Amino acid sequence: MFAFGLLGKPRPVRRPGRRWWLLGVPTTLAWAAAGWSGALGLLDGFRLMSLNRVDAWGVDAGPVVSLVLFFSVAITVASSLGFAMLWAAGPSPGRVGAGFRAGSLTTALGVALGSGLAIPSWTPPESVGQRLPVSGGRAEPWSDVDWVVYYEPYLVPAVSALAALIMITVLLRAYLTEAEADDRVQALRHRGRQVTGFVTHVECTDVWIMGHPQFVVHVRFPAETGERTVVTTLVTPLLQAPARGSAVLVRYDPQDPDSVLVEPAP
C-alpha cells in the first residue's frame, strides 16, 4: 500500500541519489578530518593518562590544543553537512530514514579513514605492560581494560570500518526495497485504474516529517467489487491538510487488492 503527500499536480518522486553523492563526499572528508584530529588531539592524550598516570596536557601541549580546535571546526562542518543530507532526502518517512542511514555511513566511513591515517602518529606509552610507579611506589601490571586502551589506535578505525560495512549492507537492502516499491508505484501510475476517492476519517499522528505533518486517513473509493476503504498515511503541508469529505486521487490494481496509491487530487 502506498501514499504520498504532494504539492500540486502529482509527479514522479525523484530519488536524491545525486544530491547524496554531492553532499556525501565532502561530509565523509569532514568526518575523516574530525576522526584524525580527534584521535590525535583527544584520544591520544586520554590514552597516555589512562596507561601511565601522567599529565599529557603539560606546558608542551600547544600542538594538542591546536588539534582540539581543528577537531571542533571539523565536527561542526561534518554535522552541518550530515544535516543537509537528511534534508536532501525529502519529506517522506522512508526517505528520511534512508537519509539518516546515509549520514551514518559517511560518519562511520570518515572516522574509519581519519583514525586509520592517524595510527602511525599515536604517542607510544612510556611503559608497556605496567603502569609507571607514582611517588616511589611499586609498578602495577596492566589490567585487561588497559590492554584494550593500548590497542585503541587500531580498535577505533576497525570498529568504525565495521559500522560502515554494516551501514552499506543496510543501505543496499533499503535501496533495493525502495526501487521495488518505486517500480510498483510507477506501474500503478501508468497501468493502474484511476478513480476519485473521498476521505472519511482523518487522524493527526503528531509526527512531522521535514516540517510537514503526517496524517492517517481513511479513504473510500469505488471498485469493481463495490466500494472499498483503505487506511493509509499522507504527508502534506499544513495548509493542504486532508479533511473529512475531501477528494483524493486513487489508483489501484484490480488483480492485487493491496496495491493502492493515494494522492491529493490535482
Image: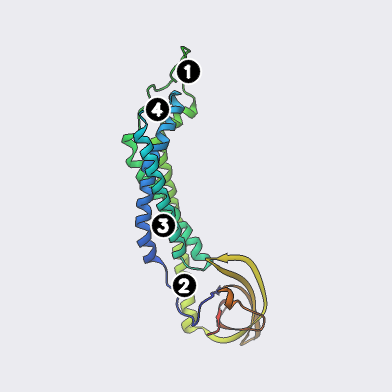
Q: CA distance from mark 3 to mark 4?
A: 35 Å
Percent x, y of residue 93: 53, 65
* Amino acid under disc 2: Asp
Mark in the foreground, 2 or 1: 1
Q: Quadrant of residue 242?
A: bottom right
What residue is disc 1 on? 140
- Establish if 79 lies above or below 174: above
What residue is disc 3 on? 81
Q: Which numbered dot is residue 182?
A: 2
Q: Earlier in the sequence, mark 1 or mark 4?
A: 4
Q: Which of 210/255 is in front?
A: 210
Mark in the foreground, 3 or 4: 4
- Establish if 40 lies above or below 173: above
Percent x, y of residue 219: 64, 80
Mark 4: give few (<14), some (14-19) or many (20+) Cα within 10 Å. Answer: few
Q: Which numbered dot is residue 58?
A: 4
Scheme of image coloration: rainbow
Q: Is residue 72 visible?
A: yes
Left or right: residue 113 versus residue 1 is left
Percent x, y of residue 262: 56, 78
Q: Are marks 3 and 1 in contact (CB under 8 Å)?
A: no
Instruction: Name the residue: 43% across, 31% down.
Output: 47
Q: CA distance from mark 3 to mark 2?
A: 27 Å
Secondary structure of the residue carrying numbered label 2: helix
